Image (spheres, rainbow, N blue to C red):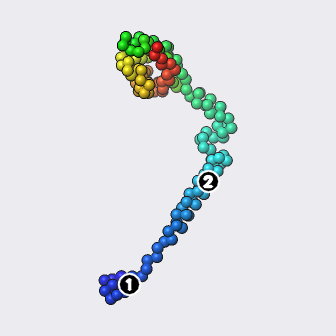
Amino acid sequence: MTDAALESGETAPPVKKPSGKKPLIFGILGALILGGGGFFAVYSGLLDSKGGGEEAAHDPHAAVEAVLQQVSFVPIEQIVISLPREASARNLRFTGELEVAPGQAEAVAALMPRILDVLNTYLRAVDVKDLESPSSAARLRAQMLRRIQVVAGDGMVRDLLITEFVLN
């Protein structure tokens, strides 16, 4: 309305308010229908939630075997480190496995003396408090993996699996 119409005493036409709960009810109802339809599609097998195709849905062992064909493991010999007298334990015993691509296993195994040397040197330099703290295990593993990857070269070693880390 204009200012002149307001001065003459006319009132503005009432503004129609949308019904308050209708849009909310339709929104919730639509979400429930879409969510239920998606659940049914995945649960009934119309959509494959695993991403492995029909073969993985029928034979779960086939998916595991497919992954294992893409990976090889190279064992790391046991390393025993003597700890200082002030430590609560006397020795650290470490054993692990290196995850490598299948074609790289022999090359990484040939580098094992260098890998053992870098692990031995690193573990001897680590503070005893870090060895004893359970919260530092992930950091120690990451540091060891990085040193192994530097020795082995880019792309040779994918991961380090610690199979034994015992303080006694």
| Quadrant of the frame with the N terminus | bottom left
At 49% across and 22% down in the image, what residue appears?
162
Above or below, 165 relative to 61: above
Q: Amino acid at mark 2?
A: Gly
Give the residue displayed 62% in from the left and 33% down from the top: 63
Q: Earlier in the sequence, mark 1 or mark 2?
A: 1
- Which of the numbered marks, if any, corresponds to residue 161? none
Q: Which residue is mark 2?
A: 36
Residue 145 picture location, percent across and down: 43, 24
> Is residue 118 visible to us here?
no
Q: Which residue is mark 1?
A: 11
Q: Choose top left, top right, bottom left or bottom right for residue 13.
A: bottom left
**Whether residue 72 is situated above or below residue 86 in the rendered picture:** below
Helix, strand, or loop for circle 1?
loop
Image location of residue 51, percent across then percent down: 59, 41
Q: Quadrant of residue 30?
A: bottom right
